Image (cartoon, grey):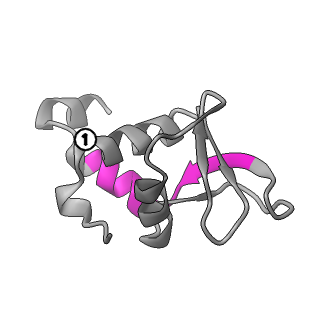
Amino acid sequence: MTVDSETLHPGQLAILRAVASGRAEITCSCEPDLYVDGVPCCNQWVVHALVRSGHVRAAHPGRIGQRVAATLTASGRDALQASLPAAAKEIA
């Protein structure tokens, strides 16, 4: 699965919003798992695609398998901003 920032589906946007709000942790691994509010994300396939596409990453290094804070990259922030309606962009 590839992630096109122009056509993110609602599930991808929900994950990006959770990461942006500081509610997500990610495991340090080559195929990281994401946890939102301590609960495993139900669509890890989408998480892997968001990580591979450079939208989400670990906020800092950790041991293999360790959970650390997840953060948006610049492209993740841009994709989330682009998904907002015009009126919301003026407020943000």
Q: Which residue is mark 1?
A: 10
Which residue is at the far left?
A: 86
Residue 71 image position (x, y, % from top left): 58, 50
Residue 5 location in percent, x, y? 26, 62
Q: Is residue 58 above or below residue 20?
A: below
Q: Is residue 92 magenta?
A: no
Number of residue marks: 1
Whole-percent x, y for residue 47 in the image: 47, 55
Q: Quadrant of residue 79?
A: bottom left
Residue at 41% x, 37% y is 17
* Nearer-the-camera pick, 86 or 67: 67
Secondary element at tag 1:
helix
The quarter in which the N terminus is drawn is bottom left
Looking at the picture, does residue 23 appear above or below residue 66? above
Q: Is residue 20 left or right of residue 79?
A: right
Which span is picked out in magenta? 68-81
Q: Is residue 70 left or right of residue 42?
A: right
Which quadrant of the figure has residue 92?
A: top left
Structural crowding at the residue carrying mark 1, measured as other residues with C-alpha within 10 Å and reported as few (<14), some (14–19) or many (≥20) = few
Q: Is residue 55 above or below residue 19?
A: below
Q: Quadrant of residue 84?
A: top left
Residue at 42 percent across and 45 percent down: it is 16
Give me the residue at 25% from left, 41% from top.
Answer: 10
Name the residue rendered at 36%, 38% in the picture.
14
- Which residue lies most toward the right here? 63
Amino acid, disc 1: Pro
* Residue 76 inside the magenta-drawn segment: yes
As displayed, is residue 2 above or below residue 5?
A: below
User: Which residue occupies the foreground of this view, 37 or 17?
Assistant: 37
